[in-house]
Structure formats: structure tokens, C-alpha cells
Image (cartoon, rainbow, N blue to C red):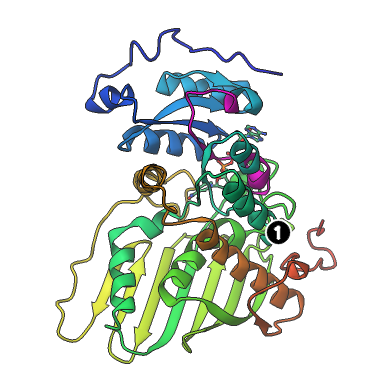
Amino acid sequence: MGGRDITPTGHAKQAPVQTSSKELREVTKDSIGFGIIGAGSIGPVHADAITAAEGAHVACVCDILEDKAQALAEKHQVPYTTSLEDMLARDDIQAVSVCTPSGMHHTHAIQAAEAGKHILCEKPLDITLAAIDEMIQAAEECSVRLSGVFQYRTMAGTLKAKQAIREGKLGKLALGDCYQKYYRAHTYYASAGWRATWELDGGGALMNQGVHGIDLIQFLMGPLARVSAHCRHITRNIPVEDTAVAILEWECGALGVLEGTTSILPGYGLHLAVNGDLGSLSLEGGNLTAWEIPGEEAVEAESEDAGDTSSDPLGLKATGHQAHVEDLVAAIREDREPLLNGREARAAVEIIKAIYLSSREGGATIELPLSYDDDGPGILPRLGGPRLEW
Ligand SMILES: NC(=O)c1ccc[n+]([C@@H]2O[C@H](COP(=O)([O-])OP(=O)(O)OC[C@H]3O[C@@H](n4cnc5c(N)ncnc54)[C@H](O)[C@@H]3O)[C@@H](O)[C@H]2O)c1
């Protein structure tokens, strides 16, 4: 079905609901028009982020479910459609936000690239390394920019931590740890058929939620050399892991621990710790909570409010996404790679795949980089447990 491709008010552009400097910017010829693919949970966050961003505006919404497309389009006073082909044919769209289930990202991103649209793609970029590499290649071949989304990376605390580590302020790094202890209710898993499936979510507590923390810790520590891990479904009747632990060995020589879960109460959030022989720091999400560097003032606990998704998947604020939108807009204008380009966004998925492979092999030590043949689930079916479909 081609959808109705209409402007709900009939005159959205001429009669914006609210008058603001943002809406005045929308009409300038330099503003990048974004189409949103997928108007479920995260699509509205992208729409808010694009609306708030310098140099960007929402131009159209697409969802195969007409009511979702219509509701989001009406909120932003833009046209909507149920046909991705129709949306990609619009010449008032220069970029798209891919907000569909994770295992569909490569299909939609490649379609967008072939239509000449730049891409802001939700995390994980996709659920296999082969699919991600196809996306990267398609963007290159079609001369469009591809940016992933890891909103905690954009936060001031994260960037300050990265700079301190890069400048050697922590000395020789000894430990890089990540604890992402979240809670997801049964209702969350039941809210969409693709959630917690190997086929479309690509995993559970790590591939969906933990991917944020894994991206952050590898951003701070640099490449991972090897890992051994165990993944389990302990409290949830889902075929993917709800809990995982891993021992990490970073290429810089440091060790580390990873714990990820979505099955505990309460959800505690995302905690990172990096320790070196000169100093240490820790982060809660992208906010610095410890800064123990000799000769430097301890930082005030920073309070950039990115929202809290540790127990509520809808508790996210759009600020980090806005930073990604503005970076993609700048990348398009300056003809450069986005800060979180495809290769950057791929790294966390490769680490998760290595964790899954280790877990499948009973905790064996897995060396990175991985090959495509190493792809597979993190847990094997257990008697009386959820059935693994892969
Ligand atoms: N950055 C974050 O913190 C964050 C938070 C939540 C979700 N996400 C990611 O966003 C993606 C979507 O998650 P969600 O929770 O919004 O899922 P969702 O199920 O709530 O929404 C997905 C939407 O995509 C639509 N859709 C499916 N196939 C489509 C197609 N062919 N064309 C157009 N629309 C289509 C569905 O109808 C649905 O409305 C996932 O990859 C997830 O990992 C990221």
C-alpha cells in the first residue's frame, strides 16, 4: 500500500503549530530535510531531535503502520506515508533516520543510500557484521554519509574522559569496566514481536541495551584484543540473553569486566570505570561521577540530563540524538565523515559477537577481529528453557 502521503493539516509548512526561530530556519534553503523511517518508540525521539537541531527539519514520516506514521506526522505537521519507496522519492528529503527494528536497518539504509539520501541509523547499526559492512559499502558507493547513533558518546563527560585518556592523564591503563544493569518488564518484550528475537533484535541484554555501554567503554579504551564470556537467560522467557558477563582484555594491555542485564530490579543505569597508574575516572551514562587525577580538581558531578532508560525504555531525552543530527548535518556540509561513522558504530557489534561466540563455546577466549563465520547466538537452548530459533 502506498499510504496517503498527505499533509495532515493540508498546510503544515505554511502554518506551523508553534512559531519559533527553529521554524523560521526550516524554510531556509540550507536546512536538511529528514525523513523518518519507523515511528515506534525511537522515531519520535528522532523527530524531536531533528526539530531541535540547527540546520535540519522533519520533512516526512514513514511507517508501515499508518496510525503510527500519522500520529508522528501530525505532531510535527509534516506529510506521512506507509511506503518507503514513496518517501525516498521525495526531493525535499536529503537524509533519513532509520528507526526500524535492528535487523531491518541494513535493508532500509541501503535503500536510502541508493536513493541518494544520507543516513542516521539507530543502534545497533545492524545485527551482523556482514550486514553492517554492506551498509558502509553502499554509503560509500552512493556517496552519502552514514552515521550511527550512540547518544552517550556525544555527552560532555564522555568527551572529557576520552580526551584525558588520549592525553595520558590516567597514565598506563590497567582496568576498563562496564556495568549496565537494566530492567525491562515483560510488557516491554511483549510490546513488539521483533524484540528479543535473534532474527531481528540480534540478541538481548547486550545487543539491544548493553550495546550502549560496550560502545562507550571501547570508545574510551580503544580496540578490544580478546574476550571470554557467559550469556544466560535467567529470569525472562526469551530466546536471547537477559544477563551476561565477560572478561575483557584491551589492546592497550588493560583488563576489564563487563556485566549486562535487563532482568534485575531496580535498573541501575550504565556505569563505566577506567583506572590507570596515574589516575581514575568513572561515568554514569555520559556524566562524569569520579575524576581522580593528581593535580586536577575533582569535577563536580555533571548533570547533563540524557534521561534515564535503566528501567523505562521510553525515559530517553532527545539531546544526544540532537547532537548526532547536527553532526550529520555538519558532515554533509563539510563533506567529511560523521563522528560516529559506520566503522566506529560497527565496533560495539563486533565485541558483542565475540562475546556471543565465547559463550557458545563455554567461555572460550576469543580473539578479535572476528570473521563473518563467527556470527551466531550467545546462548544455546536448554532443556525446558526458551527455545532458541536461529
Ligand atoms: N538510541 C537508543 O537509545 C534507542 C532506544 C530505543 C530503540 N532504539 C533502536 O531503534 C530501533 C527501533 O526500536 P523501537 O523501540 O523504536 O521499535 P518499535 O517496534 O517501537 O518501532 C519500530 C517501528 O518501525 C516500523 N517499521 C517496521 N518495518 C518498517 C518498514 N519496512 N518501513 C517503515 N516502518 C517500519 C514499525 O511499524 C514500528 O512502528 C531499534 O534498532 C532499537 O535498537 C534505540
Q: Nearer the viewer, residue 231 or 77?
A: 77
What residue does disc 1 label?
Answer: 130
Outermost residue, right direction?
A: 383
Instruction: Specify the quadrant that holds the C terminus.
Output: bottom right
Q: Quadrant of residue 350?
A: bottom right
Seen at 60% across and 63% down, the residue is: 349
Outermost residue, top direction?
A: 10
Figure check: 70 above or below 130: above
Q: Quadrant of residue 175?
A: bottom left
Figure check: 163 above or below 57: below
- Quadrant containing ligand 1 reads top right
Residue 139: x, y in percent? 58, 47
Using the rendered image of the protein, determine whether residue 64 is visible from the camera's viewpoint.
Answer: no
Drawn side of residue 124 relative to residue 174, left or right: right
Residue 146: x, y in percent? 52, 48
Q: Is mark 1 within 8 Å of ligand 1?
A: no
Residue 192: x, y in percent? 65, 40
Instruction: Specify the quadrant that holds the N terminus.
Output: top right
Part of the protein shown in magenta: 87-108
On whether residue 55 falls in the magenta region, the answer is no
Instruction: Give the residue type at disc 1.
Output: Ala
Seen at 49% across and 56% down, the residue is: 341
Outermost residue, bottom direction?
A: 277
Using the rendered image of the protein, determine whether residue 269 is visible from the camera's viewpoint.
Answer: yes
